[in-house]
Amino acid sequence: MRIPRSLFGRALALQGGTLLLVAITLPLLLTLVLHRTAEELVAASLRREASELTQQFTRTGINPHMSQPHGRGYALFDTATGATIVAGGLAVHRAFELRPPPQGIFTHSGSYDIFARHLVLHGRPTDLFVEQDKHDPVVIVDDVVRSVSWRFAALVGLIMLASLGASRLVLGRMLDSTRRAAQQASAIGPTEIGVRIDSNGLPSELQSLVDRVNDAFDRLALALAAQRDFARHVAHELKTPLAILSLRARQVADPDLRGSLSDMIARADRVVEQLAELARLDCTVPDFHEVDLAEVVRTVMEQRAILAIEAGQSIAFDVRSDALMKGHAGLLATVAENLIGNAIHHNPPGTRISVTVGPGPRLEVTDDGNGPGTAVGDRFAQRSDGGGLGLVIVQRICTLHGGKVSVTAMSPYGTRALACFAAN
């Protein structure tokens, strides 16, 4: 039997097994007690009747016409010969192997309950047998036992079902707080690092664990805040030195050296800008509105198409369907700028670039440049302006919009970058 993994399932399984055991054993025990009680009652009744018969025999002598209740019988046997002296009610046959003592003995024979005792009447040794037929309608003790047993078994079954239902309800309500805690934990992220799990209402066994988890989140929040502050401060501090280097590079007389220095400074400046942008994404929650992704990409294309033409490349733009979505237009433009800019700046002349929006809120940028044989992840990292930070920024923006970005190699040449976003 497979043990449930959940605490709720284990509790129900344990209680169900316990109730099943109780449902089986309790009726058996009750039946046993009832049978013993019934035997005691019958034995007491037969003993009492034997005492009354003994008094009558002693006081008035042996009367062959003594009446006997329906369902019962008596017989007085001669101890020495076994002959019947007198009998009444049911036909009673003496068991010769039975030698009852003077105080009497209670026993069973077939469907009969028997009480027998030894008497000396007027100097004559006799044995008195008083019997009761269990099957007689008047004798209802066993019927009562059976009826009570069945009713009790049905009652136990109903109690078991009611207990399971009540347990499920109670445990379900108890675990509602656990589910709420799980929802609160799932809400914690880079932009919601201040959210904590509420331990109120949780089972006492889980409160200590939740408190330790909240302490861990506190330490993580401090570490993330320090990291963001560091990245922001570094980006800010590098701005001025880079601006000074850019001015100094323009004063270099050698045009080749001047161009090389300007390119390297521009690349470093782009790294700093993306580092600052990444720090902003980590510590802000953008305000989303309904945005047409196609219009956002079209605006970026108008700015980037000239760069592709100057680089000797061809670039095409296609909108396959409406691309309305909830999002931040500025951040979506950053995604388009990174993906399209990478395709333009890091491919040779003659490369064909295709930019497609749709179906739905998705942006696909493909190119046929750069020969095969290079790992896709390395190629994209190398081609992202900012030493790979472009892909990190694109991934972060896609995550904020409930989507993801993927980069795959095309056969035989080229790369396909696909950014998907959540629909409205």
Image (cartoon, helix red, strand yellow):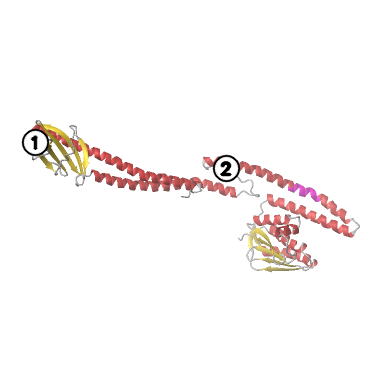
Task: Say which of 300 and 359 sits in front.
Answer: 359
Density class for disc 2 (Cα within 10 Å; few <14, some 14-19, many ≥20) is some
Residue 309 left/right relative to 295: right
User: Where on the picture, by quarter, is residue 380?
Assistant: bottom right
Residue at image location 24% in from the left, 39% down from the top: 39
Where residue 37 appears, as percent x and y from the top left, is 27, 39
Three-letter code for the amino acid on which mark 2 is drawn: Val
SS for dot 2: helix
SS for dot 1: loop
User: Where on the picture, by quarter, is residue 415?
Assistant: bottom right
Counting every numbered tag in the picture gives 2
Residue lying furthest right: 253
Task: Say which of 52 and 202 sits in front.
Answer: 52
Magenta highlight range: 231-239
Residue at image location 8% in from the left, 36% down from the top: 62
Where residue 212 appears, as percent x and y from the top left, is 60, 41
Q: Which mark is residue 210?
A: 2
Residue 186 counted in the magenta span: no
Look at mark 1 in the image and give the residue it sits on: 62
Q: CA distance from mark 2 to mark 1?
A: 89 Å
Three-letter code for the amino acid on which mark 1 is drawn: Ile
Density class for disc 1 (Cα within 10 Å; few <14, some 14-19, many ≥20) is some
Task: Say which of 330 and 349 sits in front.
Answer: 349
Rendered position, 140 above or below 349: above
Residue at image location 84% in from the left, 54% down from the top: 246
Where residue 202 appears, as percent x and y from the top left, is 53, 43
- Quarter of the image that includes the C terminus: bottom right
The dominant secondary structure in magenta is helix
